[in-house]
Image (spheres, rainbow, N blue to C red):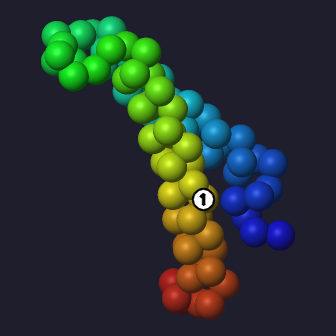
């Protein structure tokens, strides 16, 4: 079973994604003026959610990449 599918790793990747999304959503709360004219808060939150999905998939792929490299002995 790939390491990114283990319960603990999935939990950590999920927590990291949640932190990323929360931080990005805070940008709107902290400085809504930078979004004026091109994004509403609802639109921004939807974008952050889509980005979070891709972010989590990229994290999983990165974990898999390093797992494979370790299994192939690249760090010996």
Check the picture and name the quadrant holding the C terminus.
Answer: bottom right
Q: Is residue 35 left or right of residue 47?
A: left
Q: How many numbered markers are drawn?
A: 1
User: Residue shown at 73%/64% (left/top)?
Assistant: 3
Q: Is residue 21 visible?
A: no
Q: Is residue 76 left or right of residue 9?
A: left
Q: Is residue 7 left or right of residue 70?
A: right
User: Residue shown at 66%/84% (left/top)?
Assistant: 71
Q: Quadrant of residue 30?
A: top left
Q: In this view of the protein, which residue sits in the foreground, 42 or 4?
A: 42
Q: Is residue 36 left or right of residue 66?
A: left
Of all residues, the one furthest to the front in this rendering is 37
Residue 34 position, x and y percent, is: 16, 18
Q: In this view of the protein, which residue sits in the foreground, 12 or 51?
A: 51
Q: Is residue 11 visible?
A: yes
Q: Is residue 31 above or below residue 17?
A: above
Residue 16 position, x and y percent, is: 54, 39
User: Residue shown at 62%/90% (left/top)?
Assistant: 72
Q: Secondary structure at mark 1?
A: helix
Q: In this view of the protein, which residue sits in the foreground, 32 or 7?
A: 32
User: Residue shown at 83%/70% (left/top)?
Assistant: 1
Residue 23 position, x and y percent, is: 40, 25
Please name the residue that numbered disc 1 is placed on. 60
Classify 10 Å Cα crowding around label 1: few (below 14), some (14-19), many (20 and above).
some
Q: In this view of the protein, which residue sits in the foreground, 26 or 74?
A: 26
Q: Is residue 64 above or below residue 49?
A: below
């Amino acid at each position: 079973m790939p390491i990114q599918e283990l319960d603990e790793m999935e939990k950590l990747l999920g927590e990291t994604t949640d932190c990323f999304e929360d931080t990005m959503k805070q940008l709107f709360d902290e400085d809504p003026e930078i979004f004026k004219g091109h994004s509403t808060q609802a639109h921004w939150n939807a974008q952050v959610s889509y980005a979070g999905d891709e972010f989590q998939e990229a994290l999983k792929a990165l974990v898999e990449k390093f797992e494979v490299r370790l299994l192939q002995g690249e760090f010996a």
